[in-house]
Image (cartoon, helix red, strand yellow):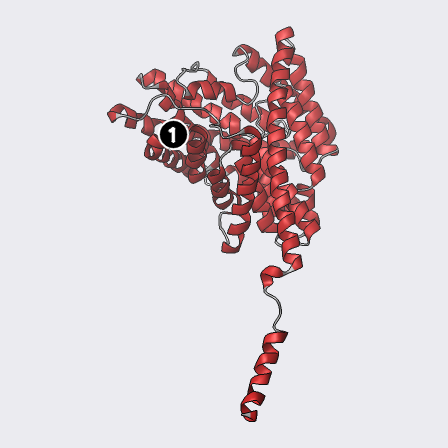
């Protein structure tokens, strides 16, 4: 009996000395709470940014309503101001913001990442994007929200002592897309397909929880809504499937044209402005702004701004003018090449609806579903991320009836674009940032 008790004592001692479970760790919960607060902040900032962007667009419309010629002054001066501040006061804020987040994912040095993702850059991104929209630029807020979300999450992680920078950037980027479009699935897919092109299982929890929290904040503030409303019509018969084919083909061709022109133009402007950065940056921005103003006036103002109103009306069944798609593509390209902060998501979706409307005029098909298919083909052609394209479009329109046709148009658009331009747009734009760092 004594021998048996002696044998049991070490086992009892080991049970007493066993450390507490990991989930009770104070440091773990501090990091989790900080992460959840960061995701909620992304939701709040995204909603406030969306409201401010709408007000900036209304301000531009109000000003141009007072004097039709005002964009000829407003756009060049606004573009020059934004490009100058993005170069001098807020370096790292120029462009869409998605390429900065992609580049930051590849960087291992914290100082290099902070030059692309910081609260200073995020504030500048919001401020300058709003000025660009108020100046008539064909830019959107969704791409910048990705950089802003990544910057917020990275800062929160640094404060909390988290050392998983790449996971934090992916989570912040996904949360930004989720809150910007009210599209949580698209946020997750975007992080997997476009941001990282590979996905670590240990990152999945970070991305998923960030998307959920940011989405809940957005839902609580603005409610559940469809970004583009309800689609008019559906794909039916041979005529409908021909529209799927042609929207994918022409959307992919136009997307490849935009991507190739964007990569080539950015490269040439970077080389040309390197000799005299101050003066030549202002000259490029001013000329691009003037061209955007001239095209906008020539099209009756339809190409100014994000293009959201025109895209929504097309989805709901209204035919857009034949010139809308090519004109909107050109002004979006000029706005992006000018060096001002601003995204291409919303303008690209608008261009896609214009392509669909143009094909609907040619084939006599349903305007609403043609706009939807054109959007899928062109958007997939521009970003070369077909899964993100059809998921984000499905969530924005709640059109589950045309799931397969939208998927087909996206895959066709992506296939055509990738054959013509092997390098994807955002990753191509991110390369100079990596070399610079």
- Residue topped by disc 1: 399
Can residue 234 be seen here? Answer: yes
Which secondary structure lies at badge 1? loop
| Picture coordinates of residue 334, whole percent (x, y) | 57, 24
Seen from the viewer's position, the closer of residues 54 and 432 is: 54
Task: Give the residue drawn at x 33%, y 31%.
Answer: 401
| Picture coordinates of residue 288, whole percent (x, y) | 62, 22
User: Mark 1: few, some, or many residues within 10 Å (few <14, many ≥20)?
Assistant: some
Task: Give the residue drawn at x 60%, y 45%.
Answer: 103
Dividing the picture into quadrants, the one containing residue 85 is top right
Task: Give the residue drawn at x 58%, y 39%.
Answer: 99
In this image, 421 relative to 404: left or right? Answer: right
Q: Is residue 222 above or below residue 68?
A: below
In this image, 344 relative to 402: left or right? Answer: right
Dividing the picture into quadrants, the one containing residue 42 is top right
Dividing the picture into quadrants, the one containing residue 102 is top right
Seen from the viewer's position, the closer of residues 347 and 48 is: 48
Task: Give the residue drawn at x 72%, y 28%.
Answer: 84
Q: Is residue 401 above or below residue 163?
A: above
| Picture coordinates of residue 104, whole percent (x, y) | 62, 46
Seen from the viewer's position, the closer of residues 118 and 91 is: 118
Can residue 96 be seen here? Answer: no
Residue closest to the far front: 1
Q: Is residue 217 above or below residue 159?
A: above
Q: Is residue 363 above or below residue 20?
A: above
Residue closest to the far top: 67
- Number of numbered discs visible in the structure rendering: 1
């Amino acid at each position: 009996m004594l021998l048996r008790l002696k044998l049991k004592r070490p086992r009892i001692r080991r049970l007493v000395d066993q450390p507490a479970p990991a989930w009770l760790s104070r440091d773990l919960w501090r990091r989790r709470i900080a992460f959840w607060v960061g995701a909620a902040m992304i939701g709040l900032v995204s909603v406030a940014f969306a409201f401010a962007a709408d007000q900036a667009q209304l301000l531009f419309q109000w000003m141009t309503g007072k004097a039709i010629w005002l964009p000829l002054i407003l756009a060049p001066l606004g573009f020059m101001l934004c490009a100058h501040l993005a170069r001098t006061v807020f370096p790292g804020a120029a462009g869409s913001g998605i390429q900065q987040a992609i580049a930051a994912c590849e960087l291992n040095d914290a100082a290099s990442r902070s030059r692309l993702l910081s609260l200073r850059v995020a504030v500048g991104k919001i401020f300058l994007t709003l000025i660009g929209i108020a100046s008539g630029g064909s830019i959107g807020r969704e791409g910048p929200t990705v950089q802003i979300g990544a910057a917020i999450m990275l800062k929160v992680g640094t404060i909390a002592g988290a050392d998983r920078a790449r996971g934090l950037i992916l989570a912040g980027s996904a949360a930004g897309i989720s809150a910007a479009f009210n599209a949580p699935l698209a946020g997750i897919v975007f992080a997997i397909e476009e941001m990282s092109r590979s996905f670590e299982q240990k990152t999945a929890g970070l991305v998923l929880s960030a998307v959920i929290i940011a989405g809940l904040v957005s839902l609580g503030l603005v409610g559940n809504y469809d970004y583009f409303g309800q689609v008019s019509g559906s794909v039916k018969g041979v005529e409908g499937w021909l529209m799927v084919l042609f929207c994918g083909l022409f959307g992919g061709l136009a997307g490849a044209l935009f991507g190739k022109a964007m990569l080539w133009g950015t490269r040439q402007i970077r080389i040309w402005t390197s000799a005299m950065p101050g003066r030549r940056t202002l000259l490029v921005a001013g000329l691009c702004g003037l061209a955007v103003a001239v095209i906008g006036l020539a099209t009756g103002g339809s190409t100014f701004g994000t293009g959201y109103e025109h895209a929504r009306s097309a989805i709901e069944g209204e035919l857009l003018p034949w010139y809308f798609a090519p004109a909107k593509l050109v002004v979006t390209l000029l706005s992006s090449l000018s060096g001002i902060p601003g995204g291409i998501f919303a303008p690209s979706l608008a261009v896609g609806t214009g392509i669909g409307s143009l094909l609907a005029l040619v084939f006599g098909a349903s305007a609403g579903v043609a706009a939807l298919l054109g959007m899928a083909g062109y958007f997939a052609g521009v970003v070369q991320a077909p899964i993100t394209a059809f998921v984000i479009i499905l969530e924005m329109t709640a059109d589950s009836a045309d799931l397969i046709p939208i998927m087909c148009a996206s895959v066709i658009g992506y296939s055509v674009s990738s054959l013509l331009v092997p390098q994807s747009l955002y990753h191509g734009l991110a390369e100079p940032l990596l070399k610079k760092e």
